Amino acid sequence: MTATDWKNKLYFGDNLDILRNHVADESVDLIYLDPPFKSDANYNILFRERSGQQSAAQITAFEDTWKWDQDSSLAYEDVVTNAPKRLSDLLQAMRSFVGENDMMAYLTMMAQRMGELHRVLKPTGSIYLHCDPTASHYLKLLMDSVFGTSNYRNEITWKRYGAHNDVGQGSTRYGRVHDILLFYGKTENVTWQQQFVPLDENYIKTTYRYLEQDTGRRFTTTPLTGPGGAEKGNPVYEWNGHTRAWRYNISKMQELHDQDRLYYSRTGYPRQKFYLDESRGVPIQDMWYDISSLSGSHKERIGFQTQKPEELLERIISASSNEGDVVLDPFCGCGTATVAAERLNRRWIGIDITHIAITLIRHRLQDTFKDDLKPYEIIGQPQDAESARALALESEHDGRYQFEWWALGLVDARPAQDKKKGADSGVDGYINFFDDNSGKAKRIVVQVKSGHVNRGQIAALKGDMEREKAEIGLFITLETPTRPMETEATSAGFYTPEHYPDAHYPRIQILTIEELLNGSKRAEYPRLAPEATFRRAPRRRRSAGAQSSFA
């Protein structure tokens, strides 16, 4: 496929399957992955095994819990028997050392995917693995095994917080304020553009101390003696009365003199000039202190707990790819890498295992780029009632809940609760909307049904609406509603906004999956102001110099 034929891709599914079946060898220029950390914190979206069984990795969405079980053992056998010898040997050694426990389950799942990521990366490509110190040392061994120690570039420390609340009275450790990014190339010949940060004002004052009287330009100077002297091969000659081993040959020295790039001391000793207005800044090092995590009030935040700053991804993408290159994020979560790639005129592939994430990314891309958004396709989501029914039937590995999350996305509703915890309140999702200037949102409650439906469920929805103080209730169903259901829904009457007395919206609306997919019906409610269900991403323009070759 040529660049002009390309369409960006957002995949729903297990990234192991998608990498194996949909991503070609050496087709990706840059990989960024922010996989679930082995930190026993309930916040990350995970994946499940190829076997189709519920794995130790996929306990529930947003829950980072790992257990060594049959799925982990099967995944371990897959790596040991099918992976290259170096990775196979390493994983066996790790099992002997770490044991059959939660950490080993995590490392085994990561080892499977690491081999596929190496396969799809171009020879000039790079990979950045985002992790925390809990398992970074083990993950570095995996990456050394897969990518080779000679292709290790950096261990980058990203300081996320100034201080952390995990240190308090009774604590016996230092505050944990940083993440790790492990940076590797596929080969030694990687794409690279050095990135810079602005010069500090105090540094400018103390370093750029000289001022040209005729131009007003500030500059600093550096010695021109050759490092290591003549024994290191630096040319020795006399210049302006000083014989030294110089950094440059005599013709280059003359060129600098003619360009007024030499500064002479009182004794005639030359130093090289560097102008402040020509400085690109300070080359970025492997300690990143200048990008903070997103606080609760940050304008980028869209309600995803592990959301990373766009600035972090923009730095990585700018350094290790060119415009038109393909960026892959196999754990794309809320889509920060896809947004950064889109803005920087890269092509992109995102993969996630939950429909919550896919819906969130879809909204974020649209809110951020509006009409400037380049074409993309979502692959793996149901396209008709039959495929939706197949998703609903996958109850053995949480397919019923995935169906609900997907169906909620059809009406832009947010899931109401974690399905793994607590009794079902009868409300699967909700939509907030505004129809006046009070600043207070009105509410729509949503119920999703994949099986048999009847009139009693509509009556129950009425009670849910009353309890939740909702103006409208949506009932989404795979099956065709019965006449008694429609009669019960009609009896609920209409919602009429106070300020728009001519507008009437059915209080209970029955929507079938088929109607939503073919566009013949949609949820009816006031859309006079932006919906508040998903926090909107700020509008961003793409960078200057956009290439149109992959439009």
Image: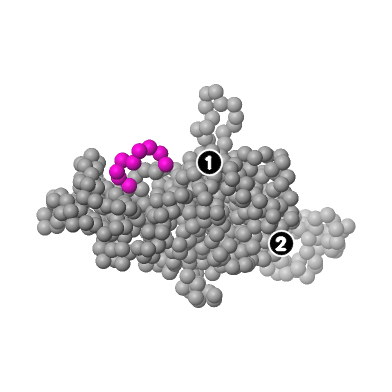
Residue type of the residue flagged with mark 2: Glu
Quadrant where the image shows the N terminus: bottom right
First in sequence, mark 2 or 1: give its number.
1
Q: Is residue 162 left or right of residue 506?
A: right
Q: How many marks?
A: 2
Residue highlighted by disc 2: 188
Q: Which residues are magenta?
A: 420-428
Q: Nearer the viewer, residue 259 or 497?
A: 497
Q: CA distance from mark 2 to mark 1?
A: 36 Å
Residue highlighted by disc 1: 65
Q: Residue at x 36, y 48 (%)?
A: 415
User: Is residue 187 visible from the viewing direction of this image?
Assistant: yes
Q: Position of residue 304 (x, y in %)?
A: 43, 47
Q: Main secondary structure of the magenta part?
A: loop
Q: Is residue 377 left or right of residue 500?
A: right
Q: Residue at x 43, y 50 (%)?
A: 395
Q: Nearer the viewer, residue 412 or 314?
A: 412
- In this rendering, the answer to whether 527 lies above or below 56 is below
Residue type of the residue flagged with mark 1: Thr
Q: Secondary structure at mark 2?
A: loop
Q: Secondary structure at mark 1?
A: loop
Q: Position of residue 115 (x, y in %)?
A: 65, 57
User: Is residue 183 visible from the viewing direction of this image?
Assistant: no
Determine if the magenta segment contains residue 343. Answer: no
The residue furthest left is 501
Crowding at mark 1 (Cα within 10 Å: few <14, some 14-19, many 20+): many
Crowding at mark 2 (Cα within 10 Å: few <14, some 14-19, many 20+): some
Q: Residue at x 72, y 49 (%)?
A: 90
Q: Position of residue 224 (x, y in %)?
A: 76, 58
Q: Residue at x 49, y 55 (%)?
A: 352
Location of residue 464 (image quadrant):
top left
